[in-house]
Image (cartoon, grey):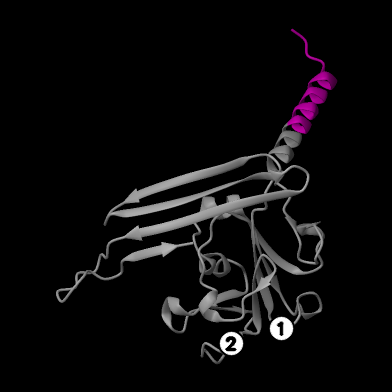
Amino acid sequence: MKFNKRSVLTSAVCAQVALLSGAMNAAVLEEVVVTAQKREQSVQDVGIAVSAFTGKQMEALGYTNAQQVTAMAPGVSTIQPNGEANYAIGIRGVANSDFTTNVESPVAIYLDEVYISQMSGAGFALFDMERVEILRGPQGTLFGRNATGGLAHFISKKPTEEAEGYAKLTLGEYDQVKFEGAVGGTLIKDTLTARLSVATHDNDGYIENRLGKDLNNAEDRT
């Protein structure tokens, strides 16, 4: 049997092109849209050092609070001088040096475009989130005061016209019961939409206390 070298070479080149095309298609990532500059843009088109996490990414990584998300961004650190009671963010070495509760940080924290001025209000639970945007560097032009080092913006899911929702229940040791759910849709056609979300977490303490109830119990409502 005779082989045509040109045909064999052509077939080999076509096979390589097909493999390369398949690899490129497999490597395509989902576009992440952010509002770091007060308008919707692809994260690749934003002229700011920004890290963005989608709600699906945070759920897959098991993030349940603001501290976990900010701690995973490059150049960003979390600061808790008084345990879980106070929480602040440091970006590129810019952070608060006075941790009294009435002092505002040079790194701003926003929740749905609402500024959180006190550290005691920044350690909130994460659930039903659309995305988190962490902007590094001064952001005073678009976000105002106390954004010298940057900011973290936590954005909740918006209501949709179609009725939709979800519910998750987790049971564990020490009588742990965690529930998370949301429901949303149209209240008045073409006029008003709404979304209600709730999260609860209860569990008994796991540190034995011989003088009273066990310690480190949880009773959270959000």
- Residue at the location (40% across, 53% down)? 178
Where residue 73 sits in the image (x, y, percent)? Answer: 60, 67
Label tally:
2
Say whether disc 2 or disc 1 marks the residue closer to the N-terminus. Answer: 2
CA neighbours of label 2 inside 10 A, class few (<14), some (14 to 19), many (20+): some
CA neighbours of label 1 inside 10 A, class few (<14), some (14 to 19), many (20+): some
Where residue 94 sits in the image (x, y, percent)? Answer: 64, 84
Q: Secondary structure at mark 1?
A: loop
Of residues 193 and 60, the one drawn nearer to the viewer in this rendering: 193
- Residue at the location (43% across, 57% down)? 200
Start-end of magenta stretch: 1-18
Q: Secondary structure at mark 2?
A: loop
Under mark 2, the amino acid is Asn
On screen, 12 above or below 157? above
Q: Is residue 179 covered in magenta?
A: no
Q: In the rendering, which numbered label is found on residue 79? A: none
Report which residue position mark 1 lands on. 148
Of residues 168 and 152, the one drawn nearer to the viewer in this rendering: 168
Where residue 156 sits in the image (x, y, percent)? Answer: 63, 58
- Residue at the location (42% across, 79% down)? 83
| Magenta residues, dominant SS class | helix
Where residue 28 sits in the image (x, y, percent)? Answer: 72, 44
Q: Quadrant of the N terminus?
A: top right
